[in-house]
Amino acid sequence: MYDFTPDPAAPREELYADLTQAALALVADEPDPVANMANLAALIWQFLPRLNWSGFYRMIDGGLVLGPFIGKPACIRIALGQGVCGAAAQSATTQLVPDVHAFPGHIACDAASRSELVVPVLREGQVIAVIDLDSPEPARFDETDAAGLERLAAAIAPHI
């Protein structure tokens, strides 16, 4: 059994360091990437407040396919360049979107989402997945969140 309890009073940089450490503990001995993504989606949900969606899209056959997540049902397939996830996967760069309604081509799986952070997961320079976080709060995510999720993505890449 795993018992990870984030400290809500900790500085956010420390919270992300703790999240990455907990993530590595979860995936250390498990070779199945889907099982690892499922646990990681739950762990992110546990550590990061004010989310309404936390999960993964996997790169399969040149597009994104829904992976493990927590939240309302979501789009199953997303083409490269489409929406925030497709933009992150196509450019291999983090997409920090304070207002999803201002993002051209935003895909609204949950009408309550107001801001989004999507971080590509790279292995050997290739996008293998994206981590997608949505929030019902405008401007919920900032550069500290982006940097923390980027470190997490780099750490877990060999395990998904």
Image: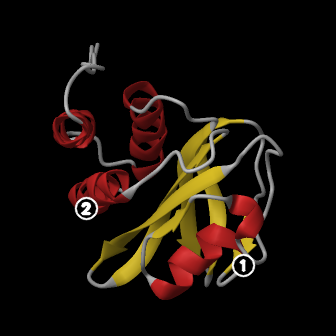
In the drawing, does residue 136 fall left or right of residue 95? right
Q: Secondary structure at mark 1?
A: loop
Looking at the image, which is closer to me, 129 or 5?
A: 5
Q: Amino acid at mark 1?
A: Gln
Residue 36: which numbered mark, if any? Answer: none
Residue 54 is drawn in which quadrant? top right
**Which residue lies under the disc numbered 1?**
82
Q: Residue at x 62, y 52 (%)?
A: 115
Q: Give residue 38's position: percent from left, percent from top.
A: 48, 39
Residue 93 is drawn in which quadrant? bottom left
Mark 2 Cα shell of 10 Å, populated few (<14), some (14-19), many (≥20) = some
Q: Quadrant of the C terminus?
A: bottom left
**Which residue lies under the disc numbered 2?**
158
Q: Secondary structure at mark 2?
A: helix
Mark 1 Cα shell of 10 Å, populated few (<14), some (14-19), many (≥20) = some
Q: Give residue 60's position: percent from left, percent from top.
A: 59, 74
In the drawing, does residue 68 fall left or right of residue 41? right
Q: Residue at x 23, y 34 (%)?
A: 15
In the drawing, does residue 5 fall left or right of residue 28? right
Distance between the Cα atoms at labels 1 and 2? Answer: 26 Å
Q: Residue at x 65, y 83 (%)?
A: 80
Q: Residue at x 63, y 69 (%)?
A: 84
Q: Earlier in the sequence, mark 1 or mark 2?
A: 1
Q: Amino acid at mark 2?
A: Pro
Q: Given this view, does label 1 or label 2 mark the residue nearer the observer?
A: 1
